[in-house]
Image (tube, grey):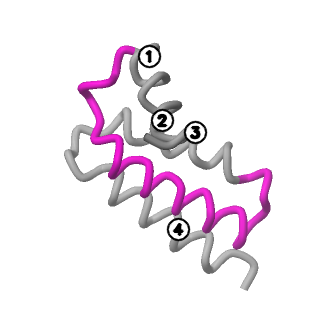
Amino acid sequence: MSTMEDWTDAVCRELGIEDAVDRATITREVLDVARDVAHGVARPAAPLTTFLLGVAVGRSASPTATADLAGLVSRLAEGWGQ
């Protein structure tokens, strides 16, 4: 396992959500959003945006909320400042 996988597993255990998320998919989607925001908006906006994404996903009942909302935020970031 990589450091990222070890860290993600440890955090999920500590938060009691290890069986609530598909860590491989979530990791890719969240890191993609963070990258898009860091490059399209501002680097410091990336962690705040991923937190806000998590809040929105937590409020949603949709099983595809992470992918749907991550795509929405990435598109917003890609067009930011144009």
Mark toward the start of the polypeptide (4 vs 2): 2
Q: What residue would you read off at disc 2?
A: 55
Q: CA distance from mark 4 to mark 1?
A: 26 Å
The question of residue 6 being in magenta is answered with: no
- The image position of residue 24, as x and y in percent, is 34, 48
Q: What residue would you read off at disc 1?
A: 15
Secondary structure, mark 3, is: helix
Q: Is residue 4 left or right of residue 44?
A: left
Secondary structure, mark 2, is: helix
In this rendered view, identify the residue nearer to me: 24 or 59.
Answer: 24
In this rendered view, identify the residue nearer to me: 27 or 71.
Answer: 27
Mark toward the start of the polypeptide (4 vs 3): 3
Dominant secondary-structure state across the stretch colored magenta: helix
Q: Is residue 38 left or right of residue 66?
A: right
Point out which mark residue 74 bears. Answer: 4
Q: What residue would you read off at disc 3?
A: 51
Instruction: Give the magenta-colored segment's residue range.
Output: 16-45
- The image position of residue 43, as x and y in percent, is 78, 58
Hey, what amino acid is under mark 1?
Leu
Q: Residues within 10 Å of mark 2 (few under 14, many from 20)?
A: few
Hey, what amino acid is under mark 3?
Phe
Which mark lies nearer to you, 3 or 1? 1
Marks 2 and 3: CB-CB under 8 Å? yes
